[in-house]
Image: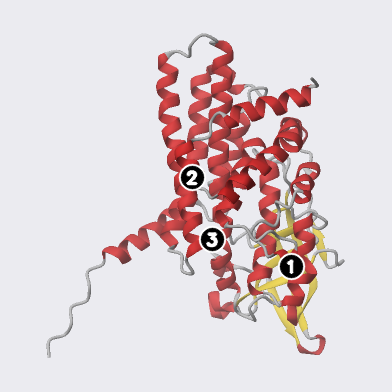
Amino acid sequence: MTPLEEIREDYLAMHGALDEPSIDAHLTGRELEVREMTRDVVSREVAPRARQADIDGEFPTHGVQALADAGLMGLVFPRELGGTGDTNVAYATAMEEITAACGSTSLVFMTQMHAAYPILKFGRDALAKQWIPGLLDGSIYGSLAITEPNAGSDVSGLRTRAVHDPAASGYHINGSKTFITTGDRAGVIVCFATTDRSKGRKGIGAFIVDGSQAEVRHGVPFHKLGMRASSTAEVFFDDAFVPEDAVLGGEGAGWRVVMQSVVKSRISAAAQGVGLARAAYARTLHTLRSVSPGRIPDEQLFVLGTLRGRLAQGRLMLITAARHVDENAEVPTGLIGMMKQSCTDLGWEVAAECARILGPLGDLADVGVERCLRDAKVTQIYDGTNEIQRLLIGREINQITAAPKQEESV
């Protein structure tokens, strides 16, 4: 057996043994099928390369393409555009599997969906046919460009400008974006820019930018704490042109596009949190069984018992929220916030606790828990910081508990 085959067998043994039948009962037959398909691809094409990709900072082209070739990139997209028409629960389950093997690969994988979804939801049919099939088959990379040097969670503070040019039937975009996933190689960019700053959120538009034009400059990827194999870079727009039919939802609809798109992106981040927690737990259990082949000491079993329960809670939260999105047109902001915040905090906290109980072994790259810890940190930051999520949850609490207005007496 080759070293790569050994990694594959170890991966399948570790993660297959950790499935919880009581939680799997909440998944449909098709969703379980998607999980097994994803686990098979991940064990062959992603897991064996994950550690070296992290060390080298090498973009995970091979793994991403393998997932695309298996039809997994388009789980929530219609078949006529190259998708499979599956549920958000199936997507979340696949994301968890990919992340458990390689956080970097999962970040590139989910960014393809994040770029394609607003085009599907708000773009014309011709626009969807132009860009979505390539995003789903991996022949083109996409980016979602919101964050700027001085504007992150506060989208109304964007300084990137889009100026309408009636003579050219389009817009000219000028400005810069930062911390853009896959920004160094994006062939299509969903760029959020302001058309009128005086209007605040109502003056924001969502523009589909062809990333190959000379007026779009792609920065050099940043060096990062975690997710090292995925690329994160600046993108500069120097009078980049966007046709009028490439404006999502019409001028001024950018805020609505953001708000509906983050439901999907926060499912992705939550699934990453659960996947990283599961990976840290699996690698810790595997290591402890190796150093204590007879029986794991009670003091470590106490911690593992607590973590197993927390993992079960996280998976149930992820599945429940994703199922709600599948079955309801209106999704409570608080529910999505609780899912994103609790599941990404779970990833960080479980990885930190696993590193603690492993002692010096927790710091070893060979064990892999330190990579889970590094990868988990950014999930608490992107797609709306967890502080923002707590604020949104709190606001909803105020709305729920507000005393009803007293009717004026006649």
Q: CA distance from mark 3 to mark 2?
A: 14 Å
Residue at 77% across / 26% down in the picture?
A: 4
Query: Of marks 2 and 1, which one's residue comes earlier in the chain?
Result: 1
Residue at 74% across / 82% down in the picture?
A: 244
Q: For numbered disc 3, what is the local secondary structure?
A: helix
Q: Which residue is mark 1?
A: 80
Q: CA distance from mark 3 to mark 1?
A: 23 Å
Residue 325: % across, % down: 50, 61
Q: Quadrant of the C terminus?
A: bottom left
Bin the neighbour count of mark 2 within 10 Å (Cα to Cα): few under 14, some 14-19, many 20 and up.
many
Query: Of marks 3 and 2, which one's residue comes earlier in the chain?
Result: 3
Q: Which residue is mark 3?
A: 263
- The answer to whether mark 3 and mark 2 are in CB contact below 8 A is no
Q: Is residue 393 above or below residue 409?
A: above
Bin the neighbour count of mark 3 within 10 Å (Cα to Cα): few under 14, some 14-19, many 20 and up.
many
Residue at the front extreme of this rendering: 29
Residue 109: % across, % down: 70, 50
Residue 115: % across, % down: 69, 61
Residue 296: % across, % down: 48, 14
Q: Which residue is mark 2?
A: 343
Residue type beneath disc 3:
Val
Residue at 82% across / 85% down in the picture?
A: 168
Residue type beneath disc 2:
Cys
Bin the neighbour count of mark 1 within 10 Å (Cα to Cα): few under 14, some 14-19, many 20 and up.
few
Q: Is residue 222 left or right of residue 349?
A: right
- The answer to whether mark 3 and mark 1 are in CB contact below 8 A is no
Q: For numbered disc 2, what is the local secondary structure?
A: helix
